[in-house]
Image (tube, rainbow, N blue to C red):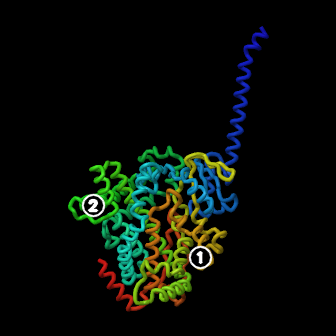
Amino acid sequence: MFSSFSLGTIPFVYGLLTLVALRVVYSRWIRNRLFRRPPGPNPVPFLGNIHQLPMDYQERTILEWGKRFGGVVYARFFQTHTIMINTLEVAQDLMEKRSANYSDRPPFILHSELMGWKSMLIHMRYGDRFRTGRRWTHDAFSSKTALKAYVPLQLRETYIMLAGLIDAPQDFVAHFARFTAATIAEIAYGHTVTSLEDPYIHMADKAAGATVEAGSPASMLVDFIPILKYYPTWLPGAGWKRKALAVRELGKQMNDYPYNMVKSKMAAGTARPSFVSNIIEQLTSQKGHMTPEEEELLKCTAGTLYGAGTETSQNVFTAFVLAMVRYPHIFKKAREEMDRVVGTDRLPDFNDRDSLPYLECVIREVLRWHVPTPLGVPHYSAKDDEYNGSVIPANSLVIANLWAISHDPTHFPNPHEFIPERWETMDKTKIEAVHPKNYVFGFGRRMCPAKNFADASAYIVLANLVATMDITRAVDAHGREIIPEHAYKSGFVHHLLPFECNIRPRSSHVAKWIAQLAASSY
């Protein structure tokens, strides 16, 4: 009986031992895998590291973590794996060289599901729809032919902006906003914006403002605790959800109104060429009609052009003025170069750009010194990835700390100072490697397709400001110069806090000249 039992149980024992061995190996593999995550701050149960990240100026805390743990930092916010990158080299290694794994966006529950922004190109998950929308925008903004076609528009709106500065210099931020709104609205919809009271601009600004208001840190908890999206709107404490759902209708109006305007004008034969009309004509000529999905994608892609383009450009122009007020010797040097190259009997145009190297250094430094979006938009890892001996888990938020990259003392000594001359000491290879355009506009397949257009707009606006306007410090009641701080609001966009300055035409002759150019532009 004993021998019979022993013989019968041998396969069972072997099987059991095999299962135990496999369990041990698997447990060790899991433990080793967990231990191989990139270094980061110690988490606590349930919360992870969320309690260690402040609500404001998060880029600074992430930079401090980077100094402590290295270029790649791992943290867990509730159950969400998060990878934070603080160096340009690592960002390019992952999001450009391995873009196939890092081109997705996280499933933003607040913005995508509740607010309804999921079809906006900036939030869209990676896939065929994203590739189609990106191809449309790439064709509209990336070729030299396309960029050349926008030159008359950029010049016209620059002259109108300069005239506005002469009439109401204290409203310089509003004039910059009108410039960016007018150029994008004309390109996207063939719509001419004459003031910030334009119905479309009003709708877009209202939707943007409501999005910011509804996107408080408390409401963003739903991105980390997804079950909160089912929280009933009638219960106490559901104000965050009611605000988010209200944004959905505002966003729909923002996208539908100008799109339907273009379609109506096309039917009447009065539509001007635009991004929207060109895509409609292209698709209808190919298939005879557009599907509802294509119409929705086109509406949202055009809306993305406005939302993404206006925020960044307006911020860059305002940062330039602040820098010139804080560092008047730099403005003086740029003016001297302008007068030497262009003279005073005409205004600079795009043909002058290669002959204005110091101004080019100033533009680079503006983008670096005041990076518009400190943390960019998070990417999302598709699968586990090994990097420098650590494992980046699948389905991780991947955040590039653009503020840390632009303030990396390895590349930019005294990073908090505005020093255009730093670019003069670099060779071409170094400039190309660390140029802000390589990170301010995103990485890899998520890079903004309109970055060359934005760069061209920055050049023509800043060149004409240098050529025509005196930008100086304001004085207080005692006649003392006011030196404004480089201060900005915390948030997705680093909006500068209001500051005082004086902007006036450099001469009465220039004022008359600008008035004539602006009048002929309408």
> Which residue is drawn at the image coordinates 50% and 56% (left, top)?
445
The outermost residue toward the bottom is: 508
Which amino acid type is marked by label 2? Met
Please tell me the numbered disc located at residue 423: 1
| Most foreground residue, 106 or 198 | 106
- Residue 187 vs residue 404: left or right? left
Q: Is residue 481 above or below residue 120?
A: below
The local secondary structure at tag 1 comes to helix
> Which residue is drawn at the image coordinates 45% and 52% (left, top)?
124
Q: Residues within 10 Å of mark 1 (few under 14, many from 20)?
A: many
User: In this orientation, does residue 69 appear?
Assistant: yes
| Most foreground residue, 180 or 80 | 180
The image quadrant that residue 346 belongs to is bottom left
> Which residue is drawn at the image coordinates 31% and 68% (left, top)?
198
The residue wearing badge 2 is 261
Which amino acid type is marked by label 1? Trp
In percent of width and height, residue 280 lies at 30, 56
In percent of width and height, residue 160 lies at 35, 78
User: In this orientation, does residue 201 appear?
Assistant: no
The image quadrant that residue 347 belongs to is bottom left
In percent of width and height, residue 320 lies at 50, 77
Q: Residues within 10 Å of mark 2 (few under 14, many from 20)?
A: some
